[in-house]
Amino acid sequence: MSPAPTPQRDRTPSPREPAGGSAAPPASGTAPARTTGWAATAAAWVPAVAVAAAMLVFGWWGIARYNSMGNDEVATRWAALLPLRELAHLLSKVDAVHGLYYLLIHGWVALGSSPALLRVPSVIAMTVAAVLMVIIGRRLTGSGWAGLFAGLIMTATPSISFYAQTARSYAMVFACVLGATLALLYALEAEAAGRSSRRRWVVYALLVALGGYLNEMSLLVLAAHAVTVLLARYGRPAVERWVLAAAGGAALVAPLVLLSVAQAAALGWVGPPGLTDLRVLVQDYFGVETVGAGLVAICAVVALLPPPGTWRWLPGGAAQAGAEPRPPWWRSGGVSPQSVAAPLLVVPAAILLIESILLHPLYVDRYVLYGEAGAALLAGAGLCRIGRWLGGISGRRALVWLPGVIVCLCVLVLQLAPQHHFRRPGSRRYDYGGPSRYIGANARPGDGIIFLGKFYRKARLGYPADFRNTSDFAMAASPLQVGNFQGRDKPFSTILPLMLDHRRIWVFGVHPSQQHPPGLVREESLALLRHFTLIGVHQFHNIAVTLWVRR
């Protein structure tokens, strides 16, 4: 691990600063001084390897989750198993935004399609993201400790494990966003040094496009990167090149954006965000457990504080020591941990929240999960800063890393209970595995089944073998024929005679009740209450399974 860096490595200087004197060794623009031999090798690789190992442990721990799948995972498995022609038909109707991910998993399922195996690509992607976190943290601060602490805080955050063990694209989006951020740092480094940066901007644009095709909401990171580029103050040519690269990457995603706009009805379930959504977002970024989240937030705030020499309440300040106080990070120019991480933490989520309040509701916390990288980077830089302060005051070198180790261990221990919860079937909004297996174990040949309403028909897509003894007599057209995940139901006038032909009917979804709003669900409920007797109720997580017998 690198020797304890001096406080001047907190930022990358503006090109306007003199090359010598008190200018800080940069984290981007000019490579920081490096040691040689085994110490340099350890500094470069040990933090990344340690964080990768930690993320793999968190990713593998409880990955099977009792073979239960949530709503999105059922959709992933079914779509990935479709032949390419049927997959193209599905994407032309719904879920085009996940098309690239479905295509990638379509190739992956050649290895198997168990829930655990479907989640492995997400574990790999989140591990890559954790390593990129270490690299970015070290590059921005010049300290391997800062990168290590940022990576460990990221891996200990329960939301990261949640999506690392979800067969969906969000872990891959996270990795693409961090990859694009690192590419941006390399491109700005070349701009500051006056070297050719065309290839680096091309890499940046391609990573932006890749993230956009995995989920178009990742394009909101461009707004965060715009703030970083403007704060760097590297001159008009650098801004123009960033604009061209960002516009090029976004333009490549334009066909997907247009297609998803045509499918906007699929997001009809999203409502305007409220205070609960904001609380969940804070938990996603800082942690579920209050004390642990508070520690991470405090460390992030420490990183955002201006240099001590500018604190007017500090007796004497830097002037007493004969040193010129450095300006705060938002006025100093160059690239710093703060100018990269703070926009990443705030800007994408703020844009999506404001848009969803003022215009059309699109906000879902997982769409901006990658903002957690900003919280982790700030916390890692803050811990490194605290260690430097304590080490400078006490003269003890060990205090440079000891506070970070203590805080990371505390955050880990405090978050263990939420981490354990996220590995249980009940951690997902819907658990399709338990109720499907229950029907598979208890249904008899000839039994009917009603999905109340048709949203719950996804269970049959995820666990077809468990419904082999039941007849979905209310379905007029299958999901494959319609090109969605629910299929199409028959009118109630056709369904009622079919209901009366069955002696036993399983009801999967919500409890039949005459209190349901007018529609097919209420009509089916009233027919069950009028002509059938309830003989069995089994409640699962947000899904009820009831058995009715003809009177």
Image: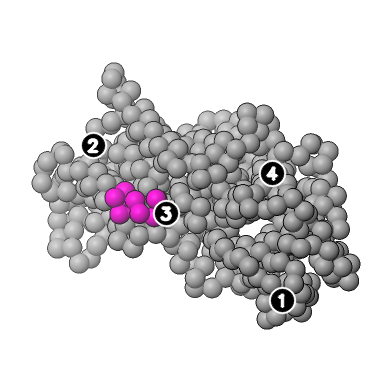
Which is more N-terminal, label 3 or label 2? 2
Q: How far is disc 1 from disc 3 in space, using C-alphas?
A: 37 Å
Asked if residue 327 is positioned above or below residue 38 in the image, the reply reads below
**Considering only order in the chain, which callout, 2 or 1, is on the residue closer to the N terminus?**
2
In the picture, measured across the screen, residue 455 lies left or right of residue 62, that is right
Mark 3 lies on a secondary structure that is: helix
Q: Which residue is mark 4?
A: 465
Magenta region, residue range: 411-420
**Mark closest to the chain's N terminus, 4 or 2:** 2
Which of 348/72 is in front? Answer: 72
The kind of residue on which mark 2 rests is Ala
CA separation, marks 4 and 2? 59 Å
- Is residue 536 inside the magenta stretch? no
Residue at the image point whose x is 56% and y is 48% from the top: 68
Which image quadrant is residue 447 in? bottom right
Q: Which residue is mark 1?
A: 529
Amino acid found under the numbered disc labelled 3: His
Q: Which residue is mark 2?
A: 4
Mark 1: which amino acid? Leu
**Which of 355/70 is in front?**
70
Residue positioned 34% across, 51% down in the render: 416
